[in-house]
Image (spheres, rainbow, N blue to C red):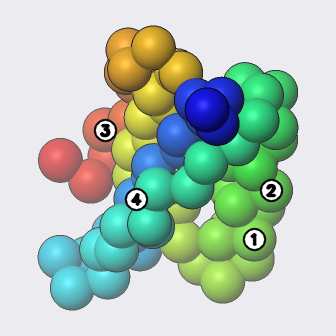
Amino acid sequence: MEKSKWILTHAIHRHTFTSRDIASPEPYDTKELALQALEDARVFYRRIGYVIWWAYLKDPEGHETLLEQDGSYW
């Protein structure tokens, strides 16, 4: 049986209603890899004028943790 993964899901925006987008959930073998992927995404999106709107990480047991939530958009 395959080992459960850490699942990272995040959304981005550019401070407009029409600029919102949600990334497909991505599986990672470790929490560290998932957190690094989020940081890499943050750097990339910043270069093109976006910010992370929210990010969740689901552990292999299914518990979900809010990693980030950008309050400037709400």
Front position among marks 3 and 1: 1
Q: Is residue 34 visible?
A: no
Residue at 36%, 67% (x, y): give it.
22
In the structure shown, which secondary structural element does the residue marked by tag 4 occupy?
strand
Q: Position of residue 13 (x, y in %)?
A: 39, 69
Dot 2: few (<14), some (14–19), or many (≥20) neighbours within 10 Å?
few
Callout 3 touching callout 1 (CB < 8 Å): no
Circle 1 is placed at which residue position? 44
Q: Amino acid at mark 4?
A: Ala
Q: CA distance from mark 3 to mark 1?
A: 20 Å
Circle 2 is placed at which residue position? 40
Classify residue 3 as left or right of residue 12. Answer: right
- The answer to which quarter of the image holds residue 48 is bottom right
In the structure shown, which secondary structural element does the residue marked by tag 2 occupy?
helix
Circle 4 is placed at which residue position? 11
Q: Position of residue 30 (x, y in %)?
A: 77, 28
Q: Amino acid at mark 3?
A: Gly
Q: Is residue 7 visible?
A: yes
Callout 1 touching callout 2 (CB < 8 Å): yes
Q: Earlier in the sequence, mark 3 or mark 1?
A: 1
Residue at 72%, 25% (x, y): give it.
31
Circle 3 is placed at which residue position? 71
Q: Earlier in the sequence, mark 4 or mark 3?
A: 4
